[in-house]
Image (tube, helix red, strand yellow):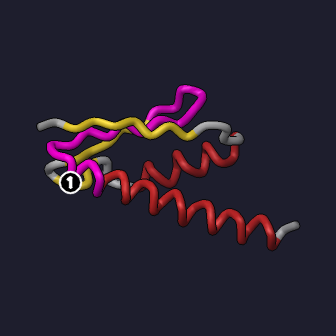
Amino acid sequence: MKAECNLVLKNLDKKEKEDLIKLFELEDKEFSSRARYTLKDSGDLIFELIADDAVALRSSMNVILKTLSIYERTKKIVDEEFE
């Protein structure tokens, strides 16, 4: 079974978009032999995940979401420091 999913990040300001593109450029686009993603900038940032099975899809989504969560927390701390 093939599993696909798109994760769309909306309403990003220019700085957030640039930060996230840089951050995910550093990531390997293939999480395993069973899952990979592409990142597209079409106004919104779109993660297109493709996996060989549901478990690999969930695992890939979790990696992306965890990275986004860490980015948000770090950004909040930095923004509070410089207010």
Residue 38 in picture, x, y percent from top left: 36, 38
Residue 26 in picture, x, y percent from top left: 42, 55
Q: Is residue 40 above or below residue 58?
A: above
Check the image and name the residue furthest to the left.
1
Q: Amino acid at mark 1?
A: Val
Horizontally, residue 11 falls left or right of residue 54, namely right
The quarter of the picture where residue 42 lies is: top right
Q: Residue at x 16, y 45 (%)?
A: 53
Residue 15 within the magenta-colored segment of the rendering: no
Q: In the image shown, does 17 or 54 lie closer to the viewer?
A: 54
Q: In the image shown, does 27 or 79 lie closer to the viewer?
A: 79
Q: Residue at x 77, y 64 (%)?
A: 79
The quarter of the picture where residue 59 lies is: bottom left
The quadrant in which the C terminus is found is bottom right
Residue 51 within the magenta-colored segment of the rendering: yes
- SS at mark 1 in the image: helix
Magenta region: which residues?
A: 40-59
The quadrant in which the N terminus is found is top left
- For disc 1, the marked residue is 55
Q: Residue at x 21, y 47 (%)?
A: 54
Check the image and name the residue furthest to the right.
83
Residue 30 in picture, x, y percent from top left: 25, 49
